Amino acid sequence: DIQMTQSPSSLSASVGDRVTITCRASQGIRNDLGWYQQKPEKAPKRLIYAASSLQSGVPSRFSGSGSGTDFTLTISSLQPEDFATYYCLQNNSFPLTFGGGTKVEIK
Amino acid sequence: EVQLVDSGGDLVQPGGSLRLSCAASGFTFSNYWMSWVRRAPGKGLEWVASIKQDGSQKYYVGSVKGRFTISRDNAKNSLYLQMNSLRAEDTAVYYCASQFASSSHYWGQGTLVTVSS
């Protein structure tokens, strides 16, 4: 099984800050990775697919990069509505696996 | 408008059974792999199972193998998850989701399963 190690598990940031979240896969997954945002009591929402493609309708302050084993989600200027939990998901091979999550809180 | 509507969640005793449903509309359901994902209280997201467009391939996370069965009815645009021998650790909100590898990607609103005596 492919393990996805996500870091940090939580962070505190201010509105306007640049935020970076990383995921490392235990083996190469090409670019078969998505990034998801989840707010309390809501379904997850995909932000990025294929490691770096912005999902339609998602603000351009979100970006993704990486290939193989190392991936990054960047929020260029954190907005109030961005405070949430973020997950990576590898869809390269079954069983699909999520990272442990990163909770982004207000500083 | 694309919609995935999850239903069937309930309070069930340990060892019991439950069948979840996901009704799809607004897209060509039969063209997509479909999956179930869950989030247990205080935990992160966990992929549970996936099924190919024609139902010919099914995959499960290890902790539910032999207890859960994913299925679909393309004529009814519906996805199902039959859950047997339920355990306390199966308590979670369950979401259906469409193909992760596609640029078009949708989620249901979730349905709560509580396993408790």
Image (tube, coloured by chain):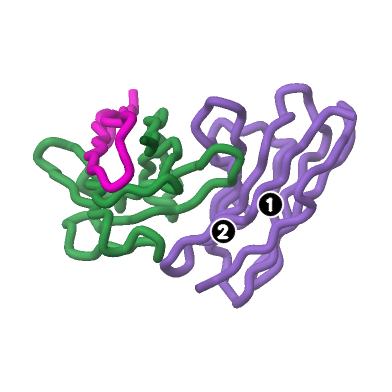
Chain colours: A purple, B green
Task: Say whether residue B32 is left or right of residue A73.
Answer: left
> What residue is disc 2 on?
A33
Q: Is residue A40 magenta?
A: no
Q: How far apart in space, not on screen, are marks 1 and 2 (Cα)? A: 10 Å
Give percent across and percent down for residue B22. Answer: 27, 35
Going by the numbered disc 1, the residue's amino acid type is Gly
The residue carrying pointer 2 sits among few (fewer than 14), some (14 to 19) or many (20 or more) residues within 10 Å by Cα, namely many
Q: Amino acid at mark 2?
A: Leu
Residue A23 or residue B111, whichever sits in front: B111
How many numbered circles are shown? 2
Pinpoint residue B97: horizontal percent, then vertical percent: 38, 42
Q: Are the residues flagged by discs 1 and 2 from a single subunit?
A: yes
Disc number for residue A64:
1
Residue sitting nearer the eye, B40 or B104? B40
Q: Nearer the viewer, residue B84 or A53?
A: B84
Residue count near mark 1 (Cα–Cα under 10 Å), binned few <14, some 14–19, many ≥20: many
Q: Are marks 1 and 2 in contact (CB under 8 Å)?
A: yes
Residue B92 visible in the snapshot? yes
Residue found at x 26% / y 63%? B66
| Magenta highlight range | B1-28
Question: Image quarter for residue A37?
Answer: top right
Position of the C terminus of chain A by quadrant:
top right
Name the residue at 14% across, 44% down: B74
| Residue A106 % position (x, y) | 84, 28
Badge 1 element: strand
Picture residue at 77% right of the left edge, 22% below the top: A80
> Does label 1 or label 2 sit earlier along the sequence?
2
